[in-house]
Image (spheres, grey):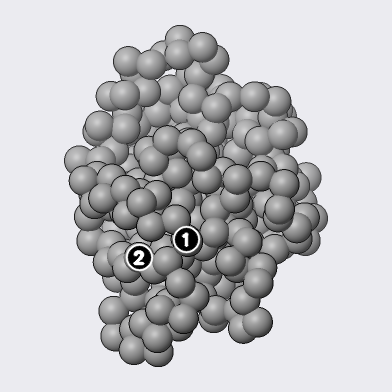
Amino acid sequence: MEQVLAILDGEEVYVTRLLSFFQTQERFAGITAAVFTKEESFWGYAKKHKVGMLLCEAGLYQNMEQKPDCQVVLLSAGGCVREEGPPVIFKFQSAGEILDELLKYYQELQPKKEGKAMEAGSWILTVCAVEGGKASGLSYALAKKKCKNQKIFYLSLDPFFMPAISGIQGNPLTEAIYFIKQNSIKLKENLSEMIQKYERVDCLFGVSHWADLSECSAAELAGLIQYIAELSKYDGIIIDAGGFTDASAGAMELSNYIVFISSEEGKFSSQEHEFIKQAKTRQPDLEMKLWKMPRCGEDAMVEELCHRLP
């Protein structure tokens, strides 16, 4: 049975206009949606269809005696939502902003990829930014935070960041790329020796030259991630991808979540627009797993991501 997005709100004009806008957006393509103004109508529909997510007015949801067995996001005008419970979207903002937030939570309809590197219950997150150093700092800070209660692997495509902060010498990522280009059994044999443990995080980083990364294809980088996932049962893999390259495209294609850090005051707006444009050409479902984050304090961004991630 097909999974759908159900929208339940007592204001018929509001909810009809909201759905009408959603259906004009390319990033909403492929999502089946149904609108309801009464709880009884929703339950009647839910008996016959598999509902993947319910976008529900907060007051209606709180008055439900029976809660739906699906992901729920609330629409709230403010002041009526409990501290604990489903995530909340402010109701009276633009339809575009509502859709942006909704797609961040809408994981049930995210297309499933064959050959996913991770086992069920695990995740892959790639951090990107066009402004130098921003993806590296956030991704590693997140890895350190998550490793306190999960087994995390950190892969850095930044030639300078990890060697600089760790003091560890060598170019194990260059070796790994070489082996995977040769389709060599030696990668599986030696990968565990290439991995460094730094501040309780399993890491792979270190290249001898920029060309090692620029010549790494999307398929080769994706293959490396597959090998990493097979090496050990990780709860999550965090990838510092930086800007858009063929290698970073391979990471994003395998990822469950993609974090894109915006620059301050739109300093790199043209480059950011081009990044998104290029990424979309590689994966039409990009918006389904893209989390755009305005640049702010690193600690605040880490806390936000920890709240969103499994």
The 10 Å Cα crowd at callout 1, few under 14, some 14 to 19, many 20 or more, is many
Instruction: Say which residue label 1 marks.
Output: 9
Q: Earlier in the sequence, mark 2 or mark 1?
A: 1
Residue 6 pos. (x, y %): 40, 68
Q: Taking 261 as reference, is 139 left or right?
A: right
Q: Taking 30 as reference, is 200 left or right?
A: right
Q: Taking 77 as reference, is 302 left or right?
A: right
Residue 273 pos. (x, y %): 31, 24
Q: Is residue 135 visible?
A: yes
Where 121 sits versus 147, above or below?
below
Q: Which mark is residue 35?
A: 2
Quadrant that contains the C terminus: bottom right
Quadrant that contains the N terminus: bottom left
Name the residue at the bottom extreme.
47
Residue 210 pos. (x, y %): 39, 25
Q: Residue 94 versus residue 163: which sits nearer the camera?
A: 94
Q: Taking 114 as reference, is 59 left or right?
A: right
Type of the residue with mark 1? Asp
| Residue pictured at 54% horizontal, 66% vertical | 72
The 10 Å Cα crowd at callout 2, few under 14, some 14 to 19, many 20 or more, is some
| Residue pictured at 43% horizontal, 77% vertical | 42
Where 265 sits versus 25, above or below?
above
Q: Residue 30 versus residue 217: which sits nearer the camera?
A: 30
Type of the residue with mark 2? Val
Where 279 sits versus 218, above or below?
above
